[in-house]
Image (cartoon, rainbow, N blue to C red):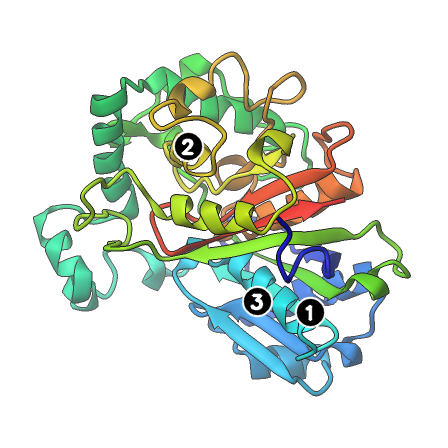
Amino acid sequence: MAGPLTDRTAIVGIGQTSFAKGLPDSELSLACQAVSDALDDARIAPSEVDGLAMFSMEDGREVDVARNVGLGDITFFSEVGYGGGAGCGVVGHAAMAVATGQCNVAVAWRARKRAAKGSRPWAQVSRRITGHWQWSRPFGVIRPVDEIAMLTRRYMHEFGATREHLANVAVAFRKHANRNPAATMYEKPLTREQYMDARWISEPLCLFDNCLETDGALAAVIVSADRAKDLPHPPAYVHSFAQSIPQQHQVMTNYFNDDPLIGPSYACAERLWAQSDFTPNDVPVAQVYDAFSPLIPLSLEGYGFCARGEGAEFTDDGALEWPGGRLPTNTSGGGMSEAYVHGFNLVLEGVRQMRGTSTSQVDGAETCLVTSGEGVPTSALLLRR
């Protein structure tokens, strides 16, 4: 059943910088470039922008972006936390603001300077043993990959998942990136043999189970559905939006949950599908948050594409690939092979699928699921043509 936000707004402009490990530009400069490019793509003047939505962990504040890009009077602004869980959240907040009249033209973005030394998990040690980190960091669970490795071991033990299933994910996404000239891994094929021979990062996760480390920025422009019809590109309508922090959730590790493999995607999916005219069976293409390969089978289960414990097997027989897969996923290469900008590139690829301009375009795709981080308070979008 449709919800109050259904198809009332649309993404009409997208922009992104180049992606690299160690760009010279500041995070603020990257943000301004992406926002400007998205407005140019939408053919909307900066002075018309009156709404902003951004990640809470970014150095370029709203005031700085608004002043440097030349935006108008801002009547709505919001920030969403939890890193990779915020990508769909900022778009959803912008869409709600437009739909409720808080603003007319909203911009959501993410800029990231991963090359900065202070971004490393071992930087600022004193801060990293406060809060929930005190239950993991002193005992050797230092990095996010270590936390996900623990969940992966549990998943393998309970459901029989193997490294072959994780290789299905990594190889599929690399194939998509090899068609995408903007992808970091555009000219770097990955074979199953290379995957199996790769060095460990945190067993059972190897080098190719991890996302890239990327500097770059991306932005999206959101307006009302009525206005979207008069703009240059086919609108990508925001059909449904949801966020979730499930009961007893512990970020990344889920220590306090009776079942640590029931992540935030389950609660998020319940709300997302309840406010949609579609079901998972109606979705022909998906952009699923992939900071680490095992998040894909966990998310496939959480969002209802298969039953509990069947996510790993779902990836067999090229299911995630294009052409020929039953659910082509992360068709630009995703965080593992295009760029890792906290999942915001998944939003832009969802828009390209709805426009018909993806480098791995799924023919006739009328809807596209986009998800944010599994393992953290999360968000999701269902876009439609």
Q: Which residue is mark 1?
A: 99
Q: CA distance from mark 1 to mark 2?
A: 31 Å
Of residue 274 and residue 204, the one placed in the foreground of this image is 274
Three-letter amino acid code at disc 1? Ala
The mark lying in front, picked from 3 and 1, is: 1
Q: Are marks 2 and 3 in contact (CB under 8 Å)?
A: no
Q: In the image, what residue occupies the spot 18% across and 60% down?
A: 132
Q: In the image, what residue occupies the spot 67% across and 56% down?
A: 6
Mark linked to residue 126: none
Q: CA distance from mark 3 to mark 1?
A: 10 Å
Q: Is residue 203 visible?
A: no
Q: Is residue 131 left or right of residue 239?
A: left
Q: Are marks 1 and 2 in contact (CB under 8 Å)?
A: no
Q: Is residue 193 left or right of residue 335?
A: left
Q: Indicate which disc, 1 or 2, sits on the residue closer to the N terminus.
A: 1
Mark linked to residue 93: 3
Q: Indicate which disc, 3 or 1, sits on the residue closer to the N terminus.
A: 3
Vertical arrangement, residue 285 with respect to residue 117, above or below: above
Three-letter amino acid code at disc 2? Glu
Q: Which residue is mark 2?
A: 301
| Residue 80 drawn at (x, y percent) | 46, 67
- Labels in figure, total: 3
| Residue 128 drawn at (x, y percent) | 20, 63
Vertical arrangement, residue 353 with respect to residue 34, above or below: above
Three-letter amino acid code at disc 3? His
